[in-house]
Amino acid sequence: MTEAGGGAAEGEGGRTIAVLGEMLELGDQAVEAHREIGRFAAEVGVDLVVAVGGPNAQQLALAAGAAGVPEIAFVSDNETAATFLEGTLKRGDVVLVKASRGGQLWQIAQALTGQPVTGL
């Protein structure tokens, strides 16, 4: 692997994909914190952001797109995210899955790697 942008990992000829869920329990700073993560994704050269969740995830996606991430997807749940990714992933893509534990985004990673999905 090589380093891309400000440090996002990039596969050989593949895209850098960030699957990002909502950060819970941020209180009054939640909206701006999600926007900041969206902008950061653009800064480090992420090619596709898949934002998973509700209004804060939507803010993350909008900020990522406005900051220059070429592809954005906004989905409401983990199952939809996994289905979307299964249809879009290509050989060489690198995927980062990150959210608060309450978002249970490990379910997406489990689905993509053929493991039984836990925590339902």
Image: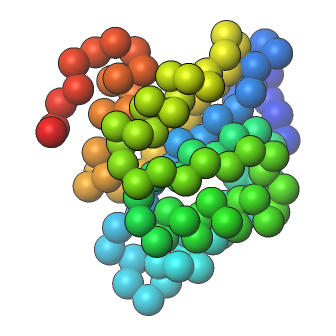
Which quarter of the figure is the N terminus placed in?
top right
Vertically, is 44 above or below 90?
below
Residue 42 visible in the displayed image: yes
Colouring rule applied to residues = rainbow
Residue 46 visible in the displayed image: no
Answer left or right for 65 relative to 80: right
Q: Quadrant of residue 48?
A: top right
Vertically, is 102 above or below 14?
below
Q: Residue at x 22, y 18 (%)?
A: 116
Q: Position of residue 35 (x, y in %)?
A: 63, 71
Q: Position of residue 18 (x, y in %)?
A: 60, 41
Q: Residue at x 76, y 19 (%)?
A: 14
Q: Position of residue 65 (x, y in %)?
A: 75, 59
Q: Position of residue 31 (x, y in %)?
A: 53, 79
Q: Residue at x 39, y 77 (%)?
A: 26
The residue nearer to you, when weighing 72 against 7, is 72
Answer left or right for 71 relative to 118: right
Q: Quadrant of residue 2?
A: top right
Q: Residue at x 40, y 28 (%)?
A: 109
The residue nearer to you, when weighing 3 against 111, is 111
Answer left or right for 16 relative to 73: right
Answer left or right for 63 relative to 105: right
Vertically, is 72 above or below 4?
below
Vertically, is 119 above or below 32?
above
Which quarter of the figure is the C terminus placed in?
top left
Q: Report the label total.
A: 0
